[in-house]
Amino acid sequence: MKKKINYFCLGLILICFLLAAMVGDTADSDWLLKPPGLRPFSEPATVIPATHHYLNQKLELPQYRSASGTPRAGWSREFIKTRRFSSDQSAWIFYRQSDLKRTKVIKNAGMPDSLRIWPVGATLILEGYKGDASRAVDARLLEIEVMTKLAPATIFATEAFFPVDWNYARYTPNGTWSLSRKKLIECHQCHSIAFRLTGDLIFTPFR
């Protein structure tokens, strides 16, 4: 009798474990991220460690362009010749003109020579292509990636530091959500490098 109870308990534990794993896989976007650092309003070139985490949230893909690829009203785009250190990939990055106008560009004595801080609510969409995206006949759309800047996670951060929390999203060419937990962490680790290179988590300098 005792063995049967033990087997029953083990079975319940296994089922709970599997259910928990399944639930985790359905919430790939709901994962805590940590900013690569904070820039004080008083000294933007200085970076101090961030002590908070924030939740990456699943977002809808905005209507940012027409079917032919032309940016919609209020949107613009910039061509990126190479993508992810690969010479056979390129990209278009779409951005709202109002977001770019609201960025804060700060002259810097070191490297980089200026810092560009994006405002809360800014949304940038990157279309990654196999081939030359500037010539539609030579390129194949691989993925659509979205980054949106969030409001600071704490009141303390709001009062003393530039906001630095970014939300990530990824879609297939047909607009289906496609962001795994592993990919989310990979995106954040890579864009954390941009924080040192441009001042925020966006690689493209928009000079």
Image (cartoon, rainbow, N blue to C red):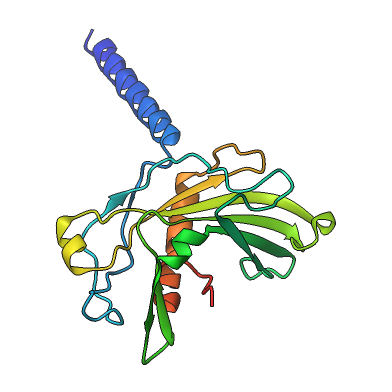
Q: Residue at x 55, y 54 (%)?
A: 74
For the C terminus, the image quarter is: bottom right
Left or right of residue 109: residue 72: right
Q: Residue 116, position in %: x, y?
A: 41, 74
Q: Residue furthest front?
A: 73
* Residue reaching furthest to the right: 137
Observer-nearest residue: 44 or 48?
A: 44
Q: Is residue 13 above or below residue 187?
A: above
95 is higher (above) or lower (below) than 59: below
Kindly indicate the quadrant of the structure image that contains residue 78.
Answer: bottom right
Please tell me whether residue 52 is drawn above or below residue 21 in the rendered image: below
In front of the other: 114 or 3: 114
- Quick check: 69 left or right of 170? right
| Rendering quarter of residue 137 | bottom right
Q: From what the image shows, is residue 161 above or below residue 187?
A: below
Q: Position of residue 181 (x, y in %)?
A: 45, 46
Which residue is depicted at the point 51% across and 51% down? 146
At a point 65% along the width and 60% down the height, the residue shown is 92
The N terminus appears in which quarter of the rendering?
A: top left
Where is residue 75 shown, x and y percent of the image? 57, 55
Q: Position of residue 132 (x, y in %)?
A: 77, 63
- Seen at 68% across and 50% down, the residue is 142
